[in-house]
Amino acid sequence: MTNRYDNGEKIYVAVDCIIFGFDEGVLKLLVFKRLVNYLKDELSLIGSFIKPDENANEAARRVLKEITGLENIFMEELKTYTDVDRDSGARCISIAQYSLIRLEDYDKQLVKKHGAQWFEINDLPKLVLDHDVMVQDALTRLRNKSKFYPIGIELLPKQFTIPQLQNLYEVIHQKKLDSRNFRKKLLSLNLLIALNKKDKSSSKKGAFLYKFDYKKYKKLEENGFNFSLFK
Amino acid sequence: MTNRYDNGEKIYVAVDCIIFGFDEGVLKLLVFKRLVNYLKDELSLIGSFIKPDENANEAARRVLKEITGLENIFMEELKTYTDVDRDSGARCISIAQYSLIRLEDYDKQLVKKHGAQWFEINDLPKLVLDHDVMVQDALTRLRNKSKFYPIGIELLPKQFTIPQLQNLYEVIHQKKLDSRNFRKKLLSLNLLIALNKKDKSSSKKGAFLYKFDYKKYKKLEENGFNFSLFK
DNA sequence: GCAAAAGTGTTACGTCTACACCCATGC
DNA sequence: GCATGGGTGTAGACGTAACACTTTTGC
């Protein structure tokens, strides 16, 4: 690429991925042992330096695939960490991105084979550098976001049951919700499409499956909205 | 600084400041003519490459002071722009930060002397690169934020009247609000401290001045809250 | 038949919206 | 005395929160 700037210093730019997984009612975080020489084998978020031919989101997707085999994960920018001393290995900023996925949709063995592992959110190990801060920031964001947006729309693309979605909210907020009110509010948004199929994996009776009406969601999002599912 | 990373390429990292000014009821944007050789003299947000000894926020404050004389502006991170071709001058990412200030608090001549100027938000010139996108993103963020947070707390530190604050909301949302409802909701938050002084600059009767109860605000913020001043 | 989870309605309460007039003052 | 912006109250609509029992089915 051409370079028309002569002043200014270049620095390292990394991406780090905060991937929350929702697995049988438990919220987990994806972590792996660092491969680079500095701080090798310590636990870390999945990350990489950004390459000349990719933007931050592409870099995050690439490294996530390399290290876990996970593909097509929608990640949202969290924040860029730029403190001078944040990385003792060199001056390096990191663009953190986060996502929330339903673990059952993915091959857990694949992740393991690649050297990554899932930790329960309530029992996290110490991570390198400022990665602990990133995780807490991402949790806060997730909680705030879920008050005003129906999370799961972008983050849980597959079909799901209402009790599953409620459980997701309960895990994120660490708080029991009233199932009647949750269901009522959720359905009043008119964003769910009933599939008239039942999922019997978590009860004998079975719960009806739904998917999100993605187009409707997008239209509403453009106009701004308040989708708090509780106060 | 030590460098323990051998792989990875360094790239340029810039900051850009989206400074909205609220001036006698009108929302304005701070713009200046680029000084660097590439695209010199075209209109641009105020920005700079980040230096080895400063983080993004410090870089933003530094360049803002250099170019406008404005000091002690609280800026919040908006987003990091990383597309490969976003800057035709070189591969360069930009960490955008925004703020909203009350223009009357600052010396407008000073800004002008330094070569910057204010444009009305409804009559913006074309800016270089992706700066137009940044401005639109910042406006969207400002609107969303003002639905859930009492903006002005961090952004308008000085004493103010309720009609002034209402006007700010109206300008941001391009929409008239009901003064009774606005006042009622605002006061119900219990975040204002009455100063028992009147500002007569915009009416004969004069309007009472208030300031924010910053401590109370911070406490509430930590617990998360919903402060929409209207729907 | 019983354990386990899914599904369903109503009422009380609080908040939001819409709406119109008097007040204080400078000129 | 009048024009200008500041300040006030209420009723209806709407949304939220609290609350317990029935249904379905696999075992």
Image: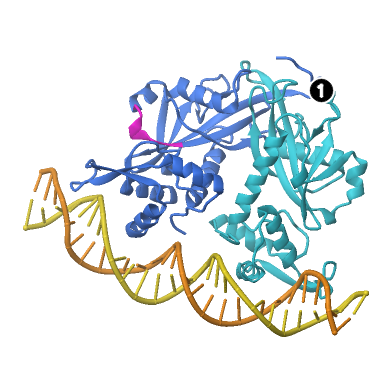
Chain colours: A cyan, B blue, C orange, D yellow
Q: B196 above or below A188?
A: above
Q: Nearer the viewer, residue B192 or B109?
A: B192
Residue B152: percent from the left, percent from the top? 42, 42
Q: Quadrant of the C terminus of chain A?
A: bottom right
Q: Quadrant of the N terminus of chain A?
A: top right
Q: Secondary structure at mark 1?
A: loop
* Residue at the spot of label 1: A38
Q: Is residue B8 left or right of residue B163?
A: right
Q: B62 above or below B161?
A: above
Q: Nearer the viewer, residue A159 or B117?
A: A159
Residue at 68% from the left image edge and 61% from the top image edge = A214
Q: Is residue A75 visible?
A: no
Q: Nearer the viewer, residue A62 or B33?
A: A62
Crowdedness near tag 1: few (<14), some (14–19) or many (≥20) residues, C-alpha within 10 Å: some
Quadrant of residue C22 in the image?
A: bottom left
Residue B169: percent from the left, percent from the top? 40, 49
Q: Which residues are magenta?
A: B100-107
Q: Is residue B37 left or right of residue A75?
A: left
Residue C6: percent from the left, percent from the top? 75, 72
Residue at 37% from the left image edge and 56% from the top image edge = B182
Residue A195: percent from the left, percent from the top? 76, 72
Quadrant of residue B103 in the image?
A: top left
Q: Is residue B61 left or right of residue A68?
A: left
Asked if the magenta segment contains residue B183, the reply would be no
The amino acid pointed to by label 1 is Tyr
- Subunit under mark 1: A
Residue at 64% from the left image edge and 37% from the top image edge = A79
Q: B149 above or below B59?
A: below
Q: Is residue B114 visible?
A: yes
Tag count = 1
